[in-house]
Image (cartoon, helix red, strand yellow):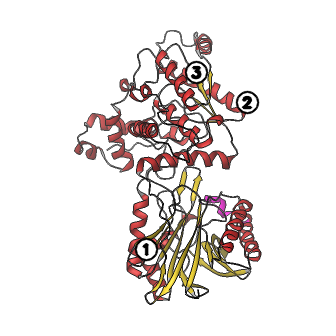
Amino acid sequence: MSDEFKISLAQLNATVGDLSGNTQKVMEAWEIARDQRSDLIAFPELFITGYNPQDLILKTAFQKAATSSIDQIAKACAQGPAIAIGGPFYDENKLYNSYYILADGKIQAVIKKHHLPNEEVFDEVRLFSSGNVDGPFQIGKMRIGSPICEDAWHTDIVETLAETGAQTLLVPNGSPYYRGKTEIRQNVMVSRVIESGLPLVYLNLVGGQDDQVFDGGSFVLNPGGELVLQLPQFEESIATCVFRKSAEGWLADTGKKSRILDAMESDYFAMVIGLRDYCRKAGFEQVVLGLSGGVDSALVATIAADALGPEAVRAVMLPSEYTSETSLEDALELAKNLKCRYDYLSIEDSRLAISNTLSDLFKGTKPDLTEENIQSRLRGVLLMAISNKFGEMLLTTGNKSEVSVGYATIYGDMAGGYNPIKDLYKTRVFDICRWRNENERPWMKATGTNIIPINIIEKPPSAELRPDQKDSDSLPDYFVLDGILKILVDEDGTIKDCIDEGYSEEDAKRIQKLLFINEYKRYQSAPGTRLSKRAFWLDRRYPIVNRWNE
């Protein structure tokens, strides 16, 4: 037993700013580790404050409260396993992203993050000072090196830790999800293991915070890169890994290996968790959305039912004289399949009243987009009234294709508090709908498959704001539009790049212009689940006024 060392991995969901709630999670997890006779329980990066705290971490009172919480944990957990937990550390007028080692009732060591990420959603150079490279810490018979998140993506920190006697690497992370990131993380960590010859514990946060979703997926690698433990993605989990000392050093026993999700399921799970945690952490128990009979609102309604339960979802059909009978039937069928509340509020009388109010002022002009937008804004007014009256958060339903080119009405269908599909291109909306119709998982709160009527998926998309309207009247076909947008947005490409991929110069220039002139709408849009490395908000930041022209 003297050559055995147990590390409990606490892959848990922290809430930004909830110091007491996060502390309670630490205490409960520590008790589990104590009962399992672990030597150490580890928590992710900045767990005590929640991640990403952004400018909240700059408030002196918050810093003091966070470090006080860590002191309290150390004293309360003096008899039992040591604790490794992320939190802020302030010293000599500098603030550090740090990892605290607690044992015997006090803080034994503070490790400061050295490499500060300053890309994508990260602004750590703005928030923290870079710490010196710290050596390993000793817990019992094991010397552990802890490169904090970004530090493990660089060779120098791990090399220094190995040279200064580390026997195992423990990497705490606040690493948010984007499509394909699981494989990238594991490949980088395998490189660190092979370079150092040390086993490695990769511990990640889980849960939603604003637009970001932390997907967990923590794992343990033995020297050589062998995967010996894999925690689930997107779910809280506490697992204990047993290390045994051999002639070659410490080796981890093989444990449970949870299934790695494919890209389609990962995206859907991320949207469910993103909405579920956004509502839970913001204090909303119910949501409302406009259900048009179209594919976007159908997917959002399904995500909401899977996230919160059908009983927490109100779907409202708001038809005008341009709403087709097919849309009415499709929306009602979806609501019945989901078993959510369905309300019907016609906007015809309201639209007529506004038209009469504006008739003298608009005399001599021809009907145009103005009249179409009135319908959308009327729906927004009614949905916000329901939201205010019943305390239900309004969900908006614009996909990434529409958000990119402004094919959505500001103060109309863009009204709302959260948009689960904001980073999902229209073509992928269809794919995700088909995937959900074919799959059911234990973490989904709506039951059954084939929930979204096939007609909703297969009929030509339309906003139904004028007779016989189709989205293709105003935009290129979605496979063309999305192809161009992936080049211009996701790859930050040029018109020439679009042409080289076979798209017409006319289409590419038109889409680029729409992309630029609708920046002001995106600045006022609701947050939504981040699924890619180029989501609108922190990943891609452009000026509202922009005269750049290739």
Where is residue 77? Give x, y as percent.
73, 75
Label 1: how many residues lie within 10 Å, few (<14), some (14-19) or many (20+)? some
Q: In the rendered structure, are the residues bearing label 3 and label 2 in contact, judged by CB atoms less than 8 Å apart?
A: no
Using the image as rendered, state which of residue 73 and residue 156 is in the foreground. Answer: 73
Using the image as rendered, state which of residue 444 and residue 162 is in the foreground. Answer: 444
Query: Relative to 504, is 259 on the left or the right?
Result: right
Task: Say whether disc 3 or disc 1 marks the residue closer to the N-terminus.
Answer: 1
Q: Is residue 461 above or below residue 448?
A: above
| Residue type at the position of mark 2 | Lys
Q: Is residue 207 above or below residue 326?
A: below
Residue identifier under label 3? 318
- The residue tagged with tag 3: helix, strand or loop? loop
Residue identifier under label 1? 154
Q: CA distance from mark 3 to mark 1?
A: 54 Å
For the question of whether residue 92 can be seen, the reply is no
Query: Relative to 251, is 355 on the left or the right?
Result: right
Residue at image location 59% in from the left, 53% down from the top: 209
Q: CA distance from mark 1 to mark 2?
A: 52 Å
Where is residue 419? Give x, y as percent.
55, 40
51 magenta-colored? yes
User: What stretch of residues is rendered in magenta?
Assistant: 50-60
- The residue tagged with tag 1: helix, strand or loop? loop
Where is residue 433? Give x, y as percent.
44, 37
